[in-house]
C-alpha cells in the first residue's frame, strides 16, 4: 500500500479565511480554539469591522503516504477514488508524511498535487514531514500543519500553523525557485531554465523562449509553451484542468504531465523524441502527438 | 570602476584557478590594471600558480578583519607591473568571508583597478556564493563530461538568482562558457562530449576551448601562468580567450585530433 486514506481525522489549524478574503489568498486553514475577533480598528481608519477572526474546527480527510513512488500512489489512489468519486470532488485534503520511511526518496509534490487535483481534490496542506519535505511542500503552496496544534490549542492563537515551525536555515533544497506568479494570465520567460530552477505560473499559461535543461521544472495551471528543447519536466494543468496542453519544439523530457496524468522519459516512444510535439489528455489518457 | 569577473564551476578540479591566473595575466599584459583574488579559503593555491607563495604576508581575510590594509596584502607580480594577487587564507574559517566584508574589499579594489578576477571555490558553498555575489561577468569553467556540464547548468541557474545584480534587478551577470581539458582524441572515440554537444546543452557564449595539455602542469609546477608559455597549445588557447573576452572574434583552435607526426603522416595514406 502506498497511500492510505484516513477520512475522519480531526484537523486543527489557524483559520485564515477572514484574512484571506482581504489578501486574496485561497482559504485553506481550519482550527479549533476559543474564538477571537479582529476588530478593524487595528487596520487604521477603516470604517467599521468587515473582518472577524474566528476559530473553528474542521474534519478533513487525510491521505497518508506510505511510499514515495508516484506510480504506485497514482494507481492506488485512482482505485480508491473510483469507489467514491463524489466524496472527493472539491474535498480539501491533508497529506500525512509521518509514515514515510526515513530514507525514502523525495516526495514529488508537483506530481502529487497534480494527481490530487486531477481527481477533483483540493490539497491544502501536509503534516508530519521533515524540514526538507516541508520546504518542498511550501513551494507547492501547501500549508505546513503542525501536529501540536491539536494538542495545545492555545498555542495556535499565537502562531499560525501554516508557517513552518522553524525557518529554513540552510535553505539549500530549493534555493533558486522562481517565485510563483500570481494573478497574471500568462508568464513569458526569454532565457534558458537551468537544472534546479523551477517556474510555476498560477492561473495561466507559461511560455519559455529557450531550452529547458534536464533537472529544471516548469509548472502551470494552464498551458506550457516551449520554444526550444524540453529536457527537464513540464507539468500543465496543475490545478486539475484536463484541457491544458504542453507544446515544445523538441521533446527530450524527463517527465511530462497534464492534470496529474504523467509519463516519464522511459515511456516516451523514441519516434516522438527530438521532434516538435503537443501533449494533452484524450479521454483521461495522456497523448503525445507530433506537430 | 572595475569590472568584476568570477571564475566558477559546479565541480572542483576543472581548471578554475588555472583560468583565473591566465585571464588575470592576459588582461594585465594588455595594460589593464588587474587584481586576482583567491576566494578558496583553506585550499588556497592561486598564489602557487602565480608563483608568489613565498611572498604572502597578509591575506584576504586579514583585510576583511581590518588587520591589514589592502595595499599591504596585495602582492605585485614580478613579471607584470599591472597585475596584483590577493591571496586567500590557508588557516581561517571560510565563514570569515562576510558579505559586507567582501563587498567592501571589492569596492576598494574597484576604485583603482580595471578588472578584478575572482577565483572561486567549486560548487555552491559559502566561499563560492561570496565570489559570485558581486560579479559583473561570470566564466563558467566546464570539462567535456556529462556530470561537469550538468553541474555548470545548475551553477548558471544559481548565478541568475543569487547575485547583487539579480537582487537589485540590474542587468544580469554576463555569462560565458569556457571548456577546459578538451581532448579531441577522447572526443573522437566517444569518451568525452564534443564541443557541439556541450554548447547545445548549455547554450551559452563560448569564450574558448582549452586543450588538455602537459604544459598546464609544467607551468603550475614552475609557478608561471600557462598563458605566458606562448609556445604551448594551452597558452595560445588562453591567449585567444582573453582576446575574445575583450571583444575580438577569433576562430576556435585545437579542436581537431592532431596528426601523430611526420612519420605516421607518411604512412597514413
Ligand atoms: N588544460 C589542462 N590540461 C591539463 N591539465 C589541466 C588543465 N587545466 C587544469 N589542469 C590540471 O587540473 C588540476 C586542477 O586545476 P585547477 O585550475 O586547480 O582547477 P580548480 O581551480 O577548478 O580546482 C590541476 O592539476 C591542473 O594542473
Ligand atoms: Mg582552484
Image: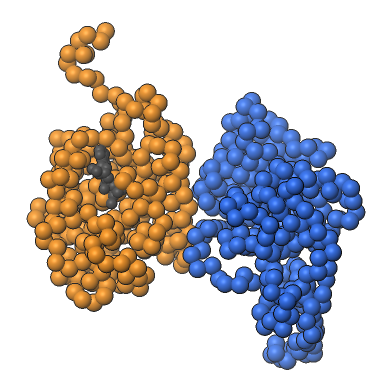
Q: Residue at x 17, y 68 (%)?
A: B58
Residue A160 sits above or below residue B195 on the image: below
Residue A67, percent from left and from top: 68, 49
Residue A166, percent from left and from top: 57, 72
Q: Is residue B251 left or right of residue A40?
A: left
Q: Is residue B29 left or right of residue A128?
A: left
Residue B26, percent from left and from top: 20, 48
The image quadrant of residue A61 is: bottom right
The image quadrant of residue B229 is: top left
Q: Residue at x 44, y 33 (%)?
A: B197
Residue A5 sits above or below residue B19 on the image: below
Q: Residue at x 66, y 55 (%)?
A: A100
User: As drawn, which residue projects farthest toward the left?
Assistant: B78
- In terms of depth relative to the viewer, which is nearer, B51 or B205? B51
* Tally of numbered discs: 0
Residue A56, percent from left and from top: 82, 77
- In terms of depth relative to the viewer, which is nearer, B162 or A188? B162
Question: Which chain is depicted orange?
Answer: B
Q: Say if residue A265 shows up in the picture.
A: yes
Quarter in which the C terminus of chain A is drawn: top right
Q: Is residue B236 left or right of residue A257?
A: left
The image quadrant of residue B230 is: top left
Q: Residue at x 13, y 52 (%)?
A: B51
Question: Which chain is depicted blue?
Answer: A
Amino acid at each position: 500500500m502506498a497511500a492510505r486514506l484516513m477520512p475522519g481525522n480531526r484537523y486543527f489549524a489557524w483559520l485564515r479565511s477572514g484574512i484571506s478574503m482581504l489578501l486574496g489568498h485561497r482559504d485553506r486553514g481550519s482550527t479549533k480554539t476559543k474564538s477571537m475577533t479582529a476588530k478593524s480598528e487595528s487596520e487604521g481608519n477603516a470604517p467599521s469591522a468587515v473582518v472577524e477572526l474566528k476559530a473553528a474546527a474542521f474534519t478533513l480527510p487525510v491521505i497518508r503516504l506510505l511510499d514515495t513512488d508516484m506510480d504506485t500512489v497514482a494507481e492506488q489512489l485512482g482505485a480508491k477514488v473510483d469507489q467514491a468519486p463524489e466524496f472527493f470532488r472539491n474535498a480539501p485534503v491533508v497529506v500525512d508524511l509521518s509514515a514515510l520511511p526515513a530514507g525514502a526518496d523525495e516526495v514529488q509534490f508537483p506530481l502529487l498535487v497534480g494527481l490530487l487535483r486531477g481527481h477533483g481534490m483540493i490539497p491544502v496542506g501536509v503534516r508530519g514531514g521533515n524540514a526538507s519535505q516541508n520546504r518542498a511542500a511550501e513551494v507547492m503552496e501547501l500549508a505546513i500543519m503542525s501536529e501540536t496544534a491539536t494538542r495545545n490549542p492555545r498555542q495556535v492563537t499565537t502562531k499560525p500553523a501554516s508557517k513552518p515551525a522553524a525557518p529554513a536555515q540552510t535553505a539549500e533544497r530549493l534555493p533558486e525557485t522562481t517565485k510563483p506568479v500570481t494573478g497574471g494570465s500568462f508568464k513569458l520567460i526569454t532565457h534558458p531554465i537551468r537544472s534546479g530552477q523551477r517556474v510555476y505560473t498560477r492561473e495561466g499559461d507559461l511560455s519559455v523562449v529557450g531550452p529547458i535543461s534536464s533537472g529544471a521544472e516548469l509548472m502551470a495551471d494552464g498551458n506550457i509553451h516551449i520554444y526550444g528543447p524540453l529536457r527537464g519536466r513540464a507539468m500543465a494543468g496543475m490545478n486539475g484542468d484536463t484541457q491544458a496542453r504542453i507544446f515544445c519544439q523538441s521533446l527530450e523530457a524527463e517527465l511530462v504531465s497534464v492534470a496529474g496524468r504523467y509519463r516519464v522519459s522511459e515511456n516516451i516512444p523514441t519516434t516522438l523524441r527530438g521532434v516538435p510535439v503537443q501533449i494533452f489528455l484524450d479521454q483521461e489518457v495522456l497523448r503525445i502527438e507530433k506537430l | 570602476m572595475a569590472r568584476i569577473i568570477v571564475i566558477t564551476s559546479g565541480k572542483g578540479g576543472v581548471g578554475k584557478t588555472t583560468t583565473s591566473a591566465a585571464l588575470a595575466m592576459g588582461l594585465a599584459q594588455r595594460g589593464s590594471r588587474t587584481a586576482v583574488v583567491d576566494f578558496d579559503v583553506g585550499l588556497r593555491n592561486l598564489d602557487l600558480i602565480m608563483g608568489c607563495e613565498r611572498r604572502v604576508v597578509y591575506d584576504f581575510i586579514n583585510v576583511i578583519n581590518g588587520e591589514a590594509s589592502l595595499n599591504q596584502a596585495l602582492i605585485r607580480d614580478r613579471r607584470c607591473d599591472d597585475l596584483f594577487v590577493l591571496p586567500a587564507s590557508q588557516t581561517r574559517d571560510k565563514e570569515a568571508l562576510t558579505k559586507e566584508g567582501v563587498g567592501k574589499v571589492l569596492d576598494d579594489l574597484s576604485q583603482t583597478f580595471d578588472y578584478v578576477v575572482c577565483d572561486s571555490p567549486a560548487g555552491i558553498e559559502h566561499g563560492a556564493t561570496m565570489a559570485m555575489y558581486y560579479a559583473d561577468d561570470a566564466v563558467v569553467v566546464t570539462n567535456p563530461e556529462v556530470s561537469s556540464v550538468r553541474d555548470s547548468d545548475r551553477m548558471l541557474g544559481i548565478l541568475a538568482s543569487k547575485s547583487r545584480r539579480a537582487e537589485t534587478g540590474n542587468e544580469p551577470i554576463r555569462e560565458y562558457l569556457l571548456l577546459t581539458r578538451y581532448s579531441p582524441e577522447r572526443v573522437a572515440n566517444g569518451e568525452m562530449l564534443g564541443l557541439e554537444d556541450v554548447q547545445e546543452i548549455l547554450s551559452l557564449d563560448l569564450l574558448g576551448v582549452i586543450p588538455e595539455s602537459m604544459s598546464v602542469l609544467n607551468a603550475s609546477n614552475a609557478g608561471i601562468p600557462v598563458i605566458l608559455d606562448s609556445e604551448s597549445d594551452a597558452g595560445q588557447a588562453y591567449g585567444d580567450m582573453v582576446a575574445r573576452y575583450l571583444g575580438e572574434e577569433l576562430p576556435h583552435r585545437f579542436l581537431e585530433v592532431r596528426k601523430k607526426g611526420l612519420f605516421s603522416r607518411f604512412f597514413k595514406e
